[in-house]
Image (cartoon, helix red, strand yellow):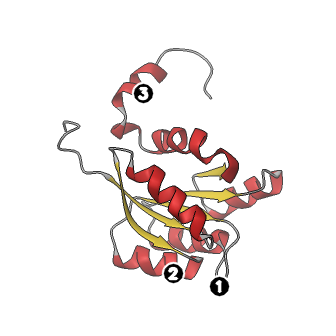
Amino acid sequence: MSEKLRPKIRVLTADDSIEIRETLFSFLTKQDQLVVMAQAADGQEALEQAGRLPVDLAILDIQMPKMSGLEAAAELRKRFPHLRILLMSAYAEPEMLRAAKKSGANGFIVKGRLRSELMRKIRRLFPEYFPQRLAKKSRPGPQD
């Protein structure tokens, strides 16, 4: 399928901080391959949005009220096995990474590195949307 005809990656974001939600929205809407379908303030709202709207990627804060991102990720994984999930936290602690993996998330991002790492993580999860990057990565050598 040509890049022009390919549908965009549909994204759901969830964070209890409106500032983080606005930052994510602003950053993601500047990416040609992405469309933000919904934003949520907690894990429960993220589950509700994912049940109502078609999404391909959920980007969830780990620590949120009502339902944590870890709990939401585990439930989203059960309900929507195709959904790709990235968890984020302000803390880069090893236990956060282990908890993210245990929840069924596909990746983990430290909030302080969102701008520098988010698209790299998304490219890894959706290589079919980034063929030029894929071609560069196909050379033999260490994986990042």
Q: Secondary structure at mark 2?
A: helix
Extreme-bottom residue of the structure: 66
Q: Is residue 11 above or below residue 134?
A: below
In the image, which disc is placed on residue 45? 2
Is 102 on the left-hand or right-hand side of 91?
left
- Residue at label 3? 133
Give the Cα distance between marks 3 and 2.
Answer: 34 Å
Q: Amino acid at mark 1?
A: Lys
Q: Between marks 1 and 3, how big is the CA–CA gap?
A: 38 Å
Q: Is mark 1 in CB contact (under 8 Å) with mark 2?
A: yes
Task: Choose between 101 and 41: the one closer to the eye.
Answer: 41
6 sits to left or right of 109: left
Q: Residues within 10 Å of mark 3 (few under 14, many from 20)?
A: some
Residue type at mark 2: give it: Glu
Rendered image quadrant of residue 1: top left
Sequence-wise, which precedes: disc 1 or disc 2?
A: 2
Residue 25: percent from left, percent from top:
46, 59
- The answer, for residue 84, to whether it is visible in the render is no
Residue under circle 1?
66
Q: CA distance from mark 1 to mark 2?
A: 9 Å
Residue shown at the point (59%, 65%) measured from the top left = 19
Residue, x 73% and y 57% (percent of image)? 90
- Which of 138/60 is in front? 60
Q: Does residue 46 appear to the left or right of 102 in the view shown? A: left
